[in-house]
């Protein structure tokens, strides 16, 4: 009987999300290579240590400055870092599938134009996870939800099964607008409100003003999503928000606190542009975007 050859994965962006995916896949027996900056290569640890509700463990991984031949390349950098990170892909022909897990929507057409529509497999992840030091990942939320466009089932079916066994909630979604907007209708109000207020989810929901503003942003985002062809239900999303752990903070909120450039264009841009295309009023979203720009010391460019 022939042995099954393990899937080969590369992680471009060894932060919280990339580290979580890489650690879980390596723990399940897959081959995992972390792609890091050339100047960090010599000192970067050849192990990933994960602290998670899914388990605490340390796994061996390979580390490289260029993307090697792999079955799946997971792109998990911040949207603000995408263009320079792609320099690590010297030869995309050695990659069977590219799986981007960035926030937002605009990266999908960019990657398709660069590497071919057939190679890019849209996917989304909802999770709070953080790289506290190189190779050390802390998964803070009690959940990790991964959704993949159904066209990727052939390549990623076994990988999704492995992640589900680790504790992920996974699914394959048939249509792309629903896949991508289903995350954004949750992410955008969460990220914008927690960042504008600098409060946790529980503190937001306990504050009538911030809570109402966040829910208004959620309904506006759902209206744009529906106009863009996605199947979303604002009431169902709100019900999910009400069940979120009260101590959650968004990555945008953490970026602003650390004086990093927030992913405002990636997260709010599709909503504002879609609203203009379809003639939809989004006053709550605009108010939150302006507040985030003030907190981050950014010039107003989105509106």
Image: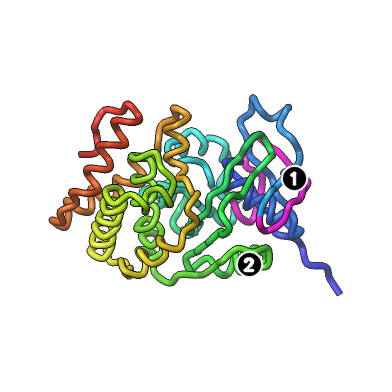
Label 2: which residue?
A: 164
Q: Which residues are magenta?
A: 53-73
User: Which of pointers 2 and 1 lies earlier in the amino acid sequence?
Assistant: 1
Q: Which colour assignment does the render follow?
A: rainbow
Indicate whether 236 appears above or below 281.
below
Give whichever of 33, 50 is nearer the camera.
Answer: 50
Helix, strand, or loop for circle 2?
Answer: helix
Find the distance from the CA under tag 2 to the CA under tag 1: 21 Å
Q: Which residue is at a point 54% across and 47% down the rendered structure image? A: 75
Left or right of 23 in this view: 187: left
Instruction: Identify the disc placed on residue 140.
Output: none
Q: Nearer the viewer, residue 113 or 81?
A: 81
Residue 62, image x, y percentages: 74, 42
Residue beneath disc 1: 61
Q: Report x, y in % for residue 233.
A: 32, 69
Residue nearest the observer in this picture, 33 or 297: 297
């Amino acid at each position: 009987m022939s042995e099954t050859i393990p899937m080969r994965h590369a992680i471009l962006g060894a932060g919280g999300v990339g580290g979580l995916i890489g650690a879980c896949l390596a723990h399940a027996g897959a081959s995992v290579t972390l792609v890091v900056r050339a100047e960090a290569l010599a000192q970067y640890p050849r192990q990933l240590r994960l602290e998670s509700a899914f388990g605490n463990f340390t796994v061996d991984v390979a580390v490289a400055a260029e993307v090697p031949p792999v079955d799946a390349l997971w792109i998990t950098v911040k949207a603000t870092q995408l263009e320079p990170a792609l320099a690590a892909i010297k030869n995309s022909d050695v990659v069977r599938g590219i799986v981007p897990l960035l926030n937002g929507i605009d990266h999908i057409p960019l990657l398709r134009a660069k590497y071919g529509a057939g190679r890019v497999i849209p996917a989304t992840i909802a999770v709070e996870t953080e790289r506290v030091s190189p190779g050390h990942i802390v998964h803070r939320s009690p959940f990790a939800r991964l959704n993949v466009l159904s066209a990727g089932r052939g390549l990623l079916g076994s990988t999704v099964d492995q992640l589900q066994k680790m504790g992920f909630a996974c699914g394959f979604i048939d249509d792309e607008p629903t896949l991508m907007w289903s995350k954004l209708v949750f992410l955008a109000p969460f990220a914008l409100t927690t960042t504008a207020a600098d409060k946790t989810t529980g503190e937001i929901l306990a504050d009538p003003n911030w809570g109402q503003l966040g829910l208004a942003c959620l309904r506006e985002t759902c209206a744009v999503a529906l106009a863009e062809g996605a199947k979303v239900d604002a009431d169902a999303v709100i019900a999910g928000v009400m069940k979120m752990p009260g101590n959650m903070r968004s990555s945008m909120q953490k970026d602003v606190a650390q004086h990093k450039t927030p992913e405002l264009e990636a997260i709010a841009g599709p909503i504002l542009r879609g609203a203009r295309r379809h003639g939809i009023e989004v006053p709550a979203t605009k108010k939150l975007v302006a507040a985030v720009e003030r907190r981050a010391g950014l010039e107003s460019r989105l509106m």
